[in-house]
Image (spheres, coloured by chain):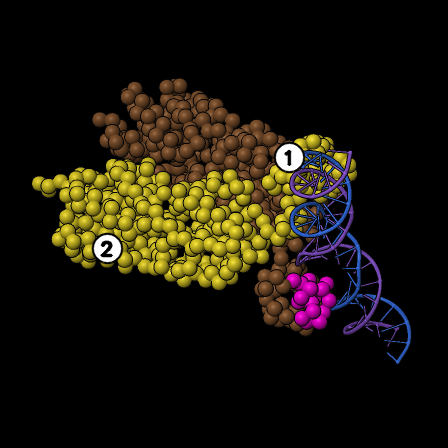
Chain colours: A yellow, B brown, C blue, D purple
Amino acid sequence: MSSKATIVDVAKECGLSQATVARVLNGQKEIQVKEKTRKKVLSAAKKIGYERNILAANFRRQKTKSIAISIADLTNPFFPELIKGIQNKIREYGYSIVQLNNEWNPKIEQDNFKYMIQSRVAGAIISPSHPKADLKVLERLPVILLTNSDEFSGYDTIANDSKGGMVLALERLFELGHRNIALFTGGSMMSAGSSWRLQIMKDFCSNRNIFFSEDLCVKCDMSVSSLDSFSQARTAMRKFLSKDTPATAIFASNDILALAALHVANEKGIKVPDELSIIGMDGILSGEISYPTLTTVEKNRSQIGSLAAKSLIEKIEAPVEWQTKKIILPCKLIERGSSGPVREKK
Amino acid sequence: MSSKATIVDVAKECGLSQATVARVLNGQKEIQVKEKTRKKVLSAAKKIGYERNILAANFRRQKTKSIAISIADLTNPFFPELIKGIQNKIREYGYSIVQLNNEWNPKIEQDNFKYMIQSRVAGAIISPSHPKADLKVLERLPVILLTNSDEFSGYDTIANDSKGGMVLALERLFELGHRNIALFTGGSMMSAGSSWRLQIMKDFCSNRNIFFSEDLCVKCDMSVSSLDSFSQARTAMRKFLSKDTPATAIFASNDILALAALHVANEKGIKVPDELSIIGMDGILSGEISYPTLTTVEKNRSQIGSLAAKSLIEKIEAPVEWQTKKIILPCKLIERGSSGPVREKK
DNA sequence: TAATAAAATGATAACGTTATCAAAATCAAG
DNA sequence: CTTGATTTTGATAACGTTATCATTTTATTA
């Protein structure tokens, strides 16, 4: 019986009208109701064990207080902290999260988009599974994209400044005396390719007038699973070392790659950072507990999540017009144990 | 206009009754409708751009196809894979996930429980934030708990056999010749304390007639964040080593602790596994990419998630009665680089 | 072909809330 | 104390689907 009491029952119980009871109970701005009646309603509701039927409310309003999060794979260390950031922010506003994963499968992603529409989520935060993801279905839904790809003009986006972050790392390595810097990139499915990284590398080297060679650029296959990527990157690193490279430092485009390089270095007895400096990118937990700890260009995922959530809610609750926003957050270089000054080989 | 077309509009468009149209469109078992009319309805629906209004359907049925997942903290490496397991399973059945985190805060947890009821989720998978978590509100909701605590009699539970897993590790270390095994435990908020681990250790040692001392048992404070726990465990490990311990092996009750021990060992130049074997528990990613890789007692979180989801859906869709189930899954010892035969000190 | 059973379709009443507008109560000012 | 303005409350109609039951159509059998 307890979960069956309706607003009408409460009205009967306290001798007020259904409308008044609703005004007290529906959690809207607390306007237009006298303190005395409010109390009457509240106690009556409590007495008969009234529980608000959110289903009915959502239906009547034709909208929910849910926001969808669409990502590829929750086990990718990038996402949990992001979602936590979102979660913490939206709790303040009374929204809840519908979690949709697509396993990098565009078809599932598309189904998820459709589901968002049908279930009338209030908005969505989306990390597109690939640069050409088709967002047509979402036309009228408030959406924030987590990307800095140029493909999504007209959409609100939030992302870290990966390019700037990469330069940050390269500059620091330069400062530390490194003149032969290797680049490890992973052709992630998310980015439109890693050619821009190569370009930045070239530009950097020519600006500083230091040695550059394609041989110093290693492209690792990134697979869906972090672990597979790790293992493929280790193979790449072993191959790289076998060529007796002159590199004194490695910049890797993500922490998994960097940790793979670190792992192989440990294996081969190469001292990090004395003989080789390694800098990664992302700031995942594993890099904080590796040996040595990993210097990395951190993307503040919690902050991104929080900002995305804030933006989204503003957009949802905005009167009518909305100016498309593109937020790019700076990365931060976190110096830990895997990087240091270059040392003369004796 | 597109998202405004209703079932009635479709009925008008194709000249059939509202009821018939609903029968075709509501995704139920495909019964009681002729192929010819089905096609008519479908094409009419497509033509006027009908989108099913899940809000209305949920309301009418007074139930949703959502299941809630209540956990403490998504950034705890234990959970993402678990949720992935759940996700993959429930997709088969057409359910979606509402994600609720409580940051170890019982009050938030309680609010989340309330929300589950009010929003009429079909069921919930809950990892209780503490052993005395109050589940009264959830009386009539199908629920599966992720715990093996004895506190929750009468509830369906699924968890790994941590005790058995611990014995697995100890036995293996014994086989490898270790006779002085240290125990690192973390007083997690989730478990009712770690005293049972100590007991198992004692029993193990007395059964095998090997050395046991309280000095070989290190209790580390576990905090909410993995990283803090890591750093506290490192301190504990340093202190432990400073006492010039006779231990040739360490069993740690979770991977974070084990990785902390490993980190300090690397730092001090203690060769793992030659001079010291380390075995952890859980099977988190960081242990697969550490140097050396971490031997661990794996809890198959993806499997737990998948089983929990399956059980829950069975329970949700069960006719009336339901036999309470308690599933305990065996752990698996994964031997990687951090464990090996004991070596004579020279 | 008629009689009966079975399958397919139609008509309509909910589900419980919120929004709208109308009515009543209260307040403010002269 | 009256008038008008303002605040508070009441009556009632949606929202779009599904469930129930009634009706029609089709299939089956004698």
User: Within the magenta stretch, is there residue A313?
Assistant: no
Q: Which residue is mark 1?
A: B137
**Is B66 or D6 nearer to us in this picture?**
D6
Residue A98 visible: no
Q: Quadrant of the C terminus of chain A?
A: top left
The magenta segment: B6-22
Name the residue: 25% across, 44% down: A279
Please identify the quarter of the rendering in which residue D17 is found. bottom right
Whether A149 is drawn above or below B185: the answer is below
Whether A62 is drawn above or below B254: the answer is below
Q: Quadrant of the N terminus of chain A?
A: top right
Q: Position of residue B85 (x, y in %)?
A: 50, 47
**Is A226 or A300 nearer to us in this picture?**
A300
Whether A194 is drawn above or below B274: the answer is below
User: Magenta-highlighted stretch: main secondary structure?
Assistant: helix
Q: Amino acid at mark 1?
A: Val
Name the residue: 38% across, 53% down: A326
Q: Amino acid at mark 2?
A: Ile
Please identify the quarter of the rendering in which residue B14 is found. bottom right
- Of badges 2 and 1, nearer the viewer stands 2
